[in-house]
Amino acid sequence: MILNASEAGQGRPLVLLHGLFGQGRNFGALSRRLAAHRRVVVVDMPNHGTSPHAPRMDYRSMAGDVAETLLARGVSGADVMGHSMGGKAAMMLALTAPVLVGRLVVSDIAPVAYPPRYGALLAAMRAVPAGASRAAADAALAEAEPDPATRAFIISNRLPDGSGWRIGIEGIAASMGAILDWSPPAGARFEGPSLFVSGERSGYVREENRPAIRDLFPAARFLTVKGAGHWVHADQPEAFAAVLEGFFRI
């Protein structure tokens, strides 16, 4: 499946993959900065942004969709950064199509299965009536997601006229088990340079995850961004951009 993507800049391609409930435009400021030196390709993942909706998603299919999208754009090799769900997709791309990946950055996610979550939030999203105002949608999500900033992030996926959701809720809901899971190809390893970035205030990547990371990515390095939670690029944009510029040798 060919995914929606936007491009800016020239030079060696650098691909950015967003996380669950996100969209490529979340990387707007970051992509503009990096595009001063590189050809930056920002991808909307399946069921997100303006990419096609799919009845189900898993990391093999997401990595395949990203590979197909890059090849359709004439990109036969790129550096790749993925955040959260996009980080798992980036890892799977590196493991299944290593010829496409030069350097890899994985932002605040580990190659492990995570416990069930988001069921209540998805149910609340489904229950928001078509035509509801932004304030009404925010109120409808408040019990399932108490954090106002996270609710605003979720509500950014509403269609501009409030008639529904741009995001493919049903496909995401049907795929939630696979999104939280992790099943790497047997025997696969990515030998290229890899950097695993964590937010200081996030619990997504733990010290005990490092052996699993090194089993798949033996050249992995680790870096913690101070003052950042799970959305490292949003919490500490200057620090995160500097990390990418250093690691990707921009």
Image (cartoon, rainbow, N blue to C red):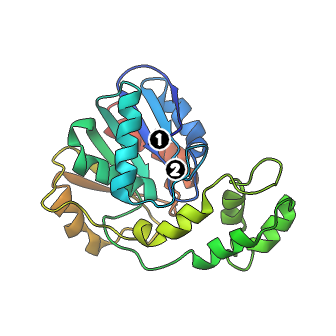
Image quarter where the C terminus lies is: top left
Query: Dot 2: few (<14), some (14–19), or many (≥20) neighbours within 10 Å?
Result: many
Q: Amino acid at mark 2?
A: His
Quadrant assignment, res 184: bottom left
Q: Which mark is residue 233?
A: 2
> Where 43 falls versus 209 (above or below)?
above
Q: Which mark is residue 241?
A: 1
Q: Earlier in the sequence, mark 2 or mark 1?
A: 2
Image location (x, y in percent) of residue 197: 37, 55
Question: Foreground: 204 or 90?
Answer: 90
Image location (x, y in percent) of residue 143: 73, 80
> Where 134 falls versus 205 (above or below)?
above
The answer to whether marks 2 and 1 mark residues whose Cβ atoms lie closer than 8 Å is yes
> Where 214 falls versus 219 (above or below)?
below
Residue beneath the point at 68% across and 78% down: 144
Question: How far, Cα to Cα, is label 2 from label 1?
Answer: 7 Å
In the picture provided, is 216 more to the left or to the right than 103?
left
Quadrant assignment, res 188: bottom left
